[in-house]
Amino acid sequence: MTTLTLDVRDATKRFGEGDTAVTAVRGVSLAVEPGEIVLIMGPSGSGKTTLLSMMGALLKPTEGSIHLDGTEISALSEGRLPDIRLRHFGFVFQDFNLLSALSALENVAIVAELAGLKGRAARDKATELLTDLGLGERLDFLPEKLSGGEKQRVAIARALVNDPALILADEPTANLDSKIGHEIMRLLRRIAKEQGRSVVIVSHDQRIRDIADRVMWLEDGTFQGHRHDGDRSGLRDGGRAGACRQRRARRRDVRLLFARLPRRVPRRQRAQRRGQRPGTSQLVPAGGCAVVAPASGINRSSRSHPATANRTGEPDRAPGHFGLGRSAQERRRTRCLKPPRRLSTRCAAWPSTARQRSSSFTPGRRTISATSRAPIRSARSPSAGSQVATGIRSSQRTDGTEAMWMRNILMRTGEAEAAFVVPVHHGRIGRLAARPW
Amino acid sequence: MTDMSAEIISIMNVIGFVVGLAVVALTVYIATLARRREHGVLKALGARNRVLYRVVLGQAVLSVALGLAIGLAFTGLSLVARTDLNLELAITAASLAKVGLFAAVIAGLAAILPIRQVAGLDPAAVFRRGVAT
């Protein structure tokens, strides 16, 4: 029988009491086996970080229990938890969280010293780990002198220094570019498979799906679904083929998300409903911020609303700048979005070159327009004339999951439509490539 | 006249103690505040509170020791340059020990507030971006 490294049983975490109580995680169960990589994804506010904190003995569940190698850590006293965290868990943070006054070597050694290793032995162990991770030449560098990838490798070395059974990573690739992010993920995978450590990753980053053995989707504090994935081909060619597969997987996910909604109306029919010639767009970038308005008939009402109207008072842009209206160049660019028969250079380079891309969805009455890599500042409901969500994504690096965010907002608020506002410096809407799913 | 001088010196000692305590306490408090996130990270990684208390106390002791060293250096300087002063300075081992003792008391008192701050840190807050731990 397989010994489970970590076993979360019906864990619920509630903050506050009475009317003001907020349930961040509801009855979640998850078993992580040795050497397994579990990726937990989900929209912001879905409870991912709370779950990760509970798994790492940083928070205690309000209900349910968490077991580590058979020991119920959620029942241990507060005084015993630091020792559990020190010896059984390795933490990798999004912001690296290295101690700025200490060198790379000292950052790793200090954690070994906390676990009782004496100065010299701790430094030797830290040196060995950092050298293994390719940082032998950077031992005495302060964190400020290290690149993002190097900082994250120092953080991984720090997580490994006490030989933990479980590594918990919170958005480990969020502050890294795609190449370094993929390297870090392959490193975590190597650690998991070669050393038999379990790795639990919380992330928005769709590009790292291929690395995980299991992908769980957390929404509103509960798991909505999961995927076991044995496809590892993306790891063999520097991630280029993997990038294409990830894009296909992402499209598949969004299709699944929308499966419960009515089928989308064909583009031509949609345009006819608006009384518009197919290939023309009504979306308007505004001064100060770009307003990405819904693309169907509801678009008219959204434009009439002051919050979503063109703030500069300029007429709508010419056809082809967004969504339904696509120029020939944009259409060529979107060819890459189709599952390629074989890997082409264009397809491999697509994620970095088409930084600004958008998605249009028309599932029945709900129309969603998404601008990838553009942090969404707020969402407004033209029908209700009110702001339905604010500060949705303001600081985090975006990764193309906006469509899911938007869909979640519509589902939660019960609104049929919303306009999503993105900052103009991410906009360049006039040069977006449309991405119909 | 002698009594009055002694009184003045006593008052100056008290003022010096209070000022010294305020300066050291503020220095240590600000230093701890600046390192709050890093202390939170250490707690999350598994550092016990007492380890962090030692760090804060060490910082306070170091600040006081530096102040003491600078004070003694100035006193030595005044001993050398006393030729034109109509004042006799007598520095005994007992007075040095007394100053050292008071310096230690200052260090201990100055560390109370930062230690309370460190004790109240939530290690789970390291996962909350944009929120100071």
Image (cartoon, coloured by chain):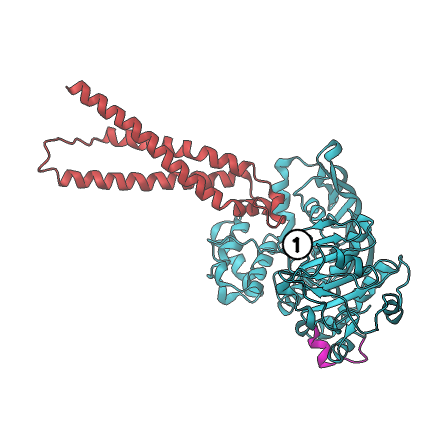
Chain colours: A cyan, B red
Find numbered disc 1 in the image and state the secondary structure of the residue it sits on: strand
Residue at the (64%, 70%) spot, across then down? A179
Asked if residue A115 shows in the view, the reply is no
The percent coordinates of residue A34 (x first, y second) are 74, 55
Residue A47 located left or right of residue B91: right
Amino acid beneath label 1: Asp
Asked if residue B49 shows in the view, the reply is yes
Residue A346 covered by magenta stretch: yes
Residue A314 located left or right of residue A274: left
Q: Nearer the viewer, residue B96 or A392?
A: A392
Label 1 crowd (10 A; few <14 / some 14-19 / many >=20): many
Residue A30 located left or right of residue A118: right
- In the image, residue B30 above or below residue B129: above
| Stretch of the chain drawn in magenta | A339-351
The percent coordinates of residue A224 (x first, y second) are 83, 52
Residue at the extreme right of the image, as rendered = A262
Residue A122 located left or right of residue A298: left
Choose top left, top right, bottom left or bottom right for residue A367: bottom right
Residue at the (73%, 60%) spot, across then down? A402
- In the image, residue B98 above or below residue A256: above
> Which quarter of the rendering shows the C terminus of chain B?
top right
Q: Which residue is mark 1?
A: A170
Q: Nearer the viewer, residue A30 or A250?
A: A250
Residue A404 covered by magenta stretch: no
Chain under callout 1: A
Choose top left, top right, bottom left or bottom right for residue A341: bottom right
> Which quarter of the rendering shows the N terminus of chain B?
top left
Q: Nearer the viewer, residue A261 or A285?
A: A285
The percent coordinates of residue B80 (x first, y second) are 14, 41
The percent coordinates of residue A33 (x first, y second) are 76, 54
